[in-house]
Image: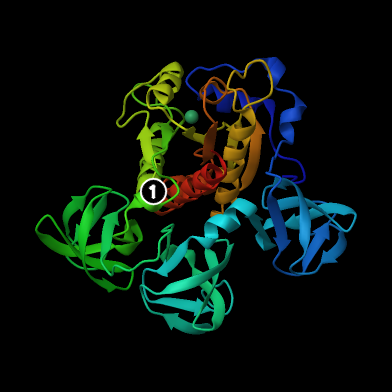
Amino acid sequence: MNLSKPSWNLKLLLSSSLVLGGMVVAPSDLTSKYFDTSQVEAASTYTTTANLNLRKSASTSATVLVTIPSGKAITYLGTYGSWFKVSYGGKTGYVSSQYVKVSTTSTVTTTSSKKYTTTVNLNLRKSASTSATVLVTIPSGKAVTYLGTYGSWYKVSYGGKTGYVSSQYIKVSTTSTTTTSPTKTYMTTANLNLRKSASTSATVLVTIPSGKAVTYLGAYGTWFKVSYGGKTGYVSAQYVKVSTTTTPTTSTGTGRTIVIDPGHGGNDPGAVYGSSYEKVIAFDIAARLASTLSSTYGYNARMTRTNDVYLSLAQRVELTKSYKGSAFVSIHANSSTNTSYHGHEVLVPTGESYTTNPYISASRSLGTAINRELGVRIPTIRNRGVKYQNVYVVGKNSVPATLVEYGFISNSNDRSHLTSTTYRQRMADATASGIHQFMSTYK
Ligand SMILES: [Zn+2]
């Protein structure tokens, strides 16, 4: 596949719009202007994190125009798979997105009030690889200084040393007050099996619903020993959010309602591939997202459907109004008869008469923020970028709105992510972070 152009075609546009419950995109909308629509907020800065080759096209075998030194600011022009089109020093070309750090002014502001805490005994490594030298093992529950995100790694400093830790074991909290109370609360972020011992093959004592408080008794590797409902056992620490007793009402999300729309449902399964149903995947990501939005960021998260029922597109838009939502995010997975199509993308409103949503620009900012977080946090799925498209629940809504396609269930790489609860949680966390970044700048 030629990565220098997005593999976006008419057939795919039709297939992705057909899964939106029968909404039809007029053929006149399917013009080439949608083929290169990656958008980014003006406030974003892109900085190289290594000496980086600027190439003539998006391929490691393409001619090198110039090697950009590490730490240089570059101008972002678009996303092509794992490549960014950028300009630097008067030259335009492609660089591997892996070595570009993306930050926004809003992110920087938010970060300053964020707290990063280890959730297990965690190795600080010399570079972002599990085979890199361990500089020090940071005890569980320690605060570290966040310096940047590199794929699934955070660059942090701790005890005078700077290195990389797996982001999976870092809790990020937005507590804006200084923590004086030592009391912590432990809450599940997914339906979570309580097991007899610290192993995925151990007997399940009970499945704890998402959002429940558990009593913490100790950490054992990646497991927490906890008690819940009179039973004591072990749960995967990954799905337990640890927070101080400071209530979520102190975080910046206070009060505002985010409407999360799991696509399809009931007799509308959405895309189907083998035993993978879009409606099921979308619901699970949505439920995780709603949980993270409320427990980590303090938003009032409302889902348009809380079980497997059919809702029309108009009902989803109406619910946004009745919930008094401040923003709307619809959750979908893509599919195509061509199994080589892959990647995640967000759909934002066009400027055409189809769009009656007055929040075109804000919707694009919301979509861009989510797309950026997904791209940075889940680099193993291709980033197809931000697409302008006439989508009912986005274009006909009355609040900033976007639709996220998390990947193609028809593609084996994407499907391996979409059917993994670990990756669904990462998708949810990335989306929550993007929403929060947008909401932090949107009044
Ligand atoms: Zn869908």
Q: How is the image coloured?
A: rainbow
Residue 386: x %, y % from top left: 64, 38
Q: Is mark 1 within 8 Å of ligand 1?
A: no
In the displayed structure, 376 sits above or below 68; it is: above
In this rendered view, identify the residue nearer to me: 129 or 122. Answer: 122
In which quadrant is the N terminus drawn? top right
Tell me the residue that label 1 is attached to.
292
Q: Amino acid at mark 1?
A: Thr
In this rendered view, identify the residue nearer to me: 358 or 260. Answer: 358
In this rendered view, identify the residue nearer to me: 312 or 142. Answer: 142
Residue 265: x %, y % from top left: 37, 26
Q: Residue 171 falls in which quadrant of the image?
A: bottom left
In the displayed structure, 62 sits above or below 424; it is: below
222 with respect to 317 (left or right): left
Residue 99: x %, y % from top left: 68, 63
Residue 201 seen from this side: no
Residue 256 seen from this side: yes
Q: Residue 245 falls in which quadrant of the image?
A: bottom left
Residue extending furthest right? Answer: 90
Residue neighbourhood size for the residue with mark 1, other residues' Cα within 10 Å, grouped as few (<14), some (14–19), many (≥20): many
Residue 430: x %, y % from top left: 50, 50
In the displayed structure, 77 sits above or below 338; it is: below
Circle 1 SS class: helix
In the displayed structure, 226 sits above or below 438; it is: below
Count up the numbered dots. Answer: 1
Q: Residue at x 63, y 16 (%)?
A: 354
In this rendered view, identify the residue nearer to me: 147 or 378. Answer: 147
